[in-house]
Amino acid sequence: MKHILTTISCLLLGACASQSIPQGTSAAFPVTITQLTASVAPASGQVEVHITIKNSFPRTLKTLRVFVAAYTTDGTKASMADESIEILGPINRGQSIGPLEKVTSIRDRNVSCVEVVRVEAVMMDYATSIASGDNAKALVTDENHRPCSPGSR
């Protein structure tokens, strides 16, 4: 009952903490993405994203949402909408989850890479941390990840 009242209070009063990570401070974000790759099914052209995450925050995470964009070999975005990957917790401190496979709605045999565009981490008390843009991209620590910068397409 107490949990329900806390949730209702957060929603009605806007009392839950939500923080965006300032530009250039992705090291303060509670999650690292230790694997991020994409593959294309030869027959259908369906794009699959493979991801592994690690909770590097000293608190348990309730939910993690990672939004990715896929790009083709000529540098164009393969879909107008970003794909959302939702990982339900609890995700304990130091815990890694993955590799997970997300079959996306994108069908394009020319996809060459994926990039993280936004990450939302929700703690057990519903406090939220958000990283977007370059801060979200900086969360990817996978040495094999192929960035989608213009020179690498």
Image (tube, grey):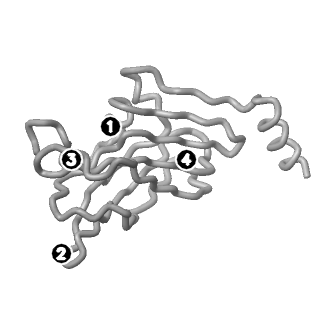
| Label 4 secondary element | loop
Task: State the residue position of label 2.
Answer: 42
Task: State the residue position of label 4.
Answer: 93
* Lower sequence index among marks 2 and 3: 2
Q: Nearer the viewer, mark 4 or mark 1?
A: 1
* Lower sequence index among marks 4 and 3: 4
- Vertical side of 1 occupied by 45: above or below: below
Q: CA distance from mark 2 to mark 3?
A: 25 Å
State the mark number for residue 143: 3
Task: State the residue position of label 1.
Answer: 137
Looking at the image, the residue that sits furthest to the right is 1
- Vertical side of 80 occupied by 9: above or below: above
Task: Give percent across and percent down for residue 46.
Answer: 28, 69
Task: Give percent across and percent down for residue 115.
Answer: 29, 45
Q: CA distance from mark 1 to mark 2?
A: 27 Å
Residue in front for this viewpoint, 5 or 111: 111
| Label 1 secondary element | helix
Is residue 41 among the parts visible in the rendering? yes
Characterize the local packing of mark 4: few (<14), some (14-19) or many (20 or more) Cα atoms within 10 angstroms: some
- Vertical side of 23 occupied by 60: above or below: below
Residue at 19% x, 57% y is 111
Residue in front for this viewpoint, 113 or 35: 113
**Relative to 86, is 12 on the left or the right?**
right
Residue at 37% x, 63% y is 104
| Amino acid of disc 1 | Lys
Residue at 57% x, 52% y is 92
| Amino acid of disc 4 | Arg
